[in-house]
Image: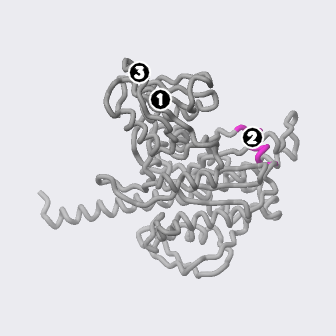
Amino acid sequence: MLSPEEVAQKKKEMEMKRELKREKRRRRSLFALIVGILALVLTIGTAIITYKRGIKGVQPGAGDVGRTNILILGADTGEYDPGRTDTIILISLDPKEKEVGILSVPRDTRVIIPGRGYNRINTAYAFGGPQLTKRTMEMLLGIDVDYYVVVDFAGFEHIVDTLGGVEIDVEKRMKYRDRAQGLYIDLQPGRQVLDGRRALHYIRYRADGLGDISLIDPVQGLYGGRIQRQQRFLEALARELLKPAAIAKIPALIDEFRSTVQTDMPAQTMLKLGLALRDMDMDRVQAQVVPGVGGKIGSASYWLADQEQLKTVVQDLFHPTPAVTVQVLNGNGQSGVARQVADSLQGQGYNVVTVGNAARFDYQQTEVHFRLDREHAARCIADLIHSQVVIQASPEDFETDVVVILGKDLRL
C-alpha cells in the first residue's frame, strides 16, 4: 500500500511523462509543417529538372492545368501517436493566374469525419489515412481536394542548411529554456539569416501565451501564435527556393525527401505544375488560418471554426464554384425532420433554398439526387446524413443542384 506522499510522487512523475509526450508530438508537427511545404516545392523542382533532361512523349503546358488543390499532411509517425496528422495545410495553385492560396487548419478543429461523426480533424488520418482526411477537408470547406502530400519531419535542419539558411525578420526577442527537452531558445529581433537549428527555434517558440493559435483581435479577425510564425517562415522559405542560386542545390535537397514524401499526384501533373509556376510571383501568395475561437464541448477542447467567416476565406483563397443549392423534402412523415436536416446542411455551408414535403411519406431509404456536375457535393451530403442512396437526376427534374428526400432510415 502506497503512502499519500508516494501516491503524489507517482502522479507527478506520470504528469511529467505525459508532458514530455505532448512536447514530442508538438515538435514533430512543427517539423512536418515546414517539410511538407518544402516537399511540394521540391517535387515541382524535380519535375522541372526531369523535363529539362528529357521525357519522351510529355508535352506539358499551363493551358491544360487548372486550379489545383493539394493537401499537405504532416504525419506524426512517432512512438507515441503514430496515427495522427498534427499539421494540415491546403495549398491552391492557379497556374494560369500565377496565384497561390495557403490555408492552415488547426489540428484541433472540430469537424464531421465521414462515417465517424464529430471529432478533431487530426484524427481523420488515424481512421482512414490521407483519403479520409481529403474527404473531411472537402466537407469542411465545400471544395474538391485534388491530391495529397504526406511528409514527416526528418532532415529539416539539413534542408535549411543546404539552402544556406533562410532570411527572416524575427519580430521580437524570443528567449525560452526547457531543461527537460534540452532546449534553449535565444533569438534576437531583427532581419537575419537563420540556419537549420535556429530556424527550428523560431518555429518552435510558443512562450508568448498564445500557444499554437489564438484569436487576438475579434474585430479585425487577427490571429497570433506559433501557426502564424510558421506561415511567415514558409513565405520566407519559398522566397529562398525561388532564388536563382537555389536551382543548383535542388538535387541535394531532393535526396533528403525521397524517403519522406508520399503523394498521389501523378508525375505528369507535377511536371506541368512545375513548368507553369516556375515564374510565380510571391506577391500573389495569400496565407490564412481557418477562422474561429478556442473552446470546449463537454470536457474536450477544440478549435471551433466560424462557418460564415470560413466561407469568405475559402472564396478568397480557392475561388470555388458557386455554392451548392439544396432542396430538403420530408419523405418519412416525421414532423420537423426536414427543417432539422436543412439547418445542419446550412451549418456546413450548403445553400438550402427549399424545405418541404415529398410527394409521399413511405420512403424507406433516404435518397440524395443530384445534377450531373454536382455528384461530389451530393456524396458529401450523403455522408453527412448517413445515406447510401445517391442518384443522378436529369437537369429538368429539379430546380436545385441537389435534392434530399428523407426516408424512414434517417438517423439524426
Measure how far apart labels 2 and 1 are at the Cα level: 36 Å
Q: Point out residue 212 in the picture as x, y percentages from the top left corner.
A: 47, 64
Looking at the rendering, the stretch of residues picked out in magenta corresponds to 266-275
The residue type indicated by label 2 comes to Thr
Magenta span: predominant SS is helix
**Decide: marks 3, 2 in contact (CB < 8 A)?**
no
The residue type indicated by label 3 comes to Gln
Image point (69%, 69%), residue name: 165
In which quadrant is the C terminus drawn? top left
Identify residue for label 3: 365
Measure how far apart labels 1 and 3 are at the Cα level: 11 Å
**Decide: marks 1, 3 in contact (CB < 8 A)?**
no
Near-viewer residue (113 or 75): 113
Q: Point out residue 31 in the picture as x, y percentages from the top left corner.
A: 56, 59
Image point (82%, 45%), residue name: 62
Q: Is residue 282 magenta?
A: no
Identify residue for label 2: 269
Q: How many marks?
A: 3
Q: Is residue 271 magenta?
A: yes
Give above or below for 43 relative to 8.
Answer: above
Q: Residues within 10 Å of mark 2 (few under 14, many from 20)?
A: some
Q: Point out residue 109 in the picture as x, y percentages from the top left corner.
A: 45, 52
The residue type indicated by label 1 comes to Val
Identify residue for label 1: 404
